[in-house]
Image: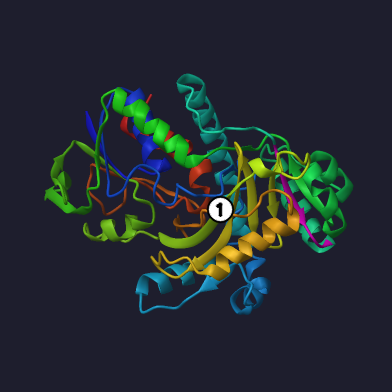
Amino acid sequence: MQVCVLGAGIVGLATAYELQQRGFQVTVIDQAQPGMGASGGNGAQLSYSYVQPLADASIWRQLPRLLLSPSSPLKLRPQWDTHQWHWGLAFLRACNRHTSERSTERLLALAALSRHGLEAMLQAESIDCDFSRTGKLVLYDTPAGLAAAQRQMELQRAWGSQQQAVSAARCAEIEPALHHYQSRIAGAIYTPSECAADCLKLCQGLQAVLAARGVRFLLGAQVRGFVRQGRRIAAVQTSAGAVEAQQFVLALGSHSHAVARTLGLRLPVYPLKGYSITLDTTGANAAPGTVPRVNVTDAARKVVFARIGHRLRVAGMAELVGHDARIPPARIESLCNAARALFPGCSEFEELRPWTGMRPATPTGLPVVGPHASGPDNLLLNTGHGSLGFTLAFGTAAQVAELLAPA
């Protein structure tokens, strides 16, 4: 069977890999090179135990500060875009305890499936992507924040998460680079099993593996529409011509909504814009304990830190501003300030490699996987992973492959 995967980010490439492993003939189409969208400069953390969706009941009390504070990690720029308003209202409806807990349970199960798939692939293919399993610390600056995190930890324990609350002193023992900062830490949640990797290097490695096995890549080709025959898609129309296939998988991230609209479908996927910098840490190697080895998340600043080889990825922010690829200097300075506050000796800060990407988010945080109720019979969706695209990619890829080739 011929399957056309639309999208060469980590989700699309993981899908292509799972399908090729099952004997499908696969074509991958993207307007850019593999991993150059939201995958390329993401937070690099594989957060299998930190999947609680953004839509949570606590958002209501935080909303005024998040929307009005100049230093807020969340930014909303209202637009004459009904899709933005529909998405925002659906997000607010999802900000309740029941929906959050139900979504968290499903995301944890999906994350466990994804961990198995990714690590099996890495063992089989030996792709160099700076993979590490050094654990993760999520830092809280107030007792109230820590108490709320402990309640979430206990909730997740029933679903298999192995985590522990630790003191500021214990944080410094786990990650010596935090020693100078421990007076500002109320406590943390520590997960020893969490991982990190360079998603862009993994995407590039997957492309090489797949191309060597006969997967066709049509890159630099923009999807413009579809040729339909009754309830089926006969071909996808691209800027490089039409591509026929028997099955199609839509994995175009934040662009999935616009492409689905050409089929008359509405997807609850909207871009959440994020930023990152990537710091060279080689200049800090002479000073032991200045560069973190463990993944760290600063819950107050909503900033994540991940060591990938001799680099430190620093990422954060969530902006509902549409597809705006501009990188405001203030956002990059905010990430630099966070890195200097937690890890002042980690880098010379001479080369920042600023990046922005559009995370394809759904209001509930759950990705959209499988057929659309009103869609063509031979179209499957695999999109809407939000900030968990790297974490969940191989899980949803396995689900798509099972739909096409059930055991």
Q: Secondary structure at mark 1?
A: loop
* Residue 165 percent coordinates (x, y): 81, 46
- Nearer to the camera, 29 or 383: 29
Figure quadrant of residue 402: top left
Of 14 and 228, the residue lying toward us: 14
Q: Is residue 218 visible?
A: yes
Above/below status of 128 relative to 179: above
Does 166 lie within the magenta span?
no
How far across and how far down the image is residue 266, in percent?
32, 61
Q: Quadrant of the C terminus?
A: top left
Residue drawn at point x = 37 percent, y = 70 percent: 83
Could you tell whether 383 is left or right of 229 in the image?
Answer: right
Instruction: Judge the density around disc 1: few (<14), some (14-19), many (≥20) Cα neighbours within 10 Å.
Output: few
Please identify the quadrant where the N terminus is shown. Answer: top left
Q: In x, y percent, where is residue 27?
A: 24, 35
**In this rendering, would 55 be left or right of 3?**
right
Q: Which residue is mark 1?
A: 351
By what rule are the colours in the image chosen?
rainbow
Q: Residue at x 60, y 57 (%)?
A: 100
Q: State which region is magenta.
A: 135-142
**Toward which corner of the image does residue 49 lie, by quadrant?**
top right
Residue 93 at x, y = what percent?
53, 68
Residue drawn at x 47%, y 67% is 90
Query: Does 309 appear above or below 179?
Result: above
Q: Main secondary structure of the magenta part?
A: strand
**Type of residue at label 1?**
Glu
Q: Judge left or right: residue 342 versus residue 407.
A: right
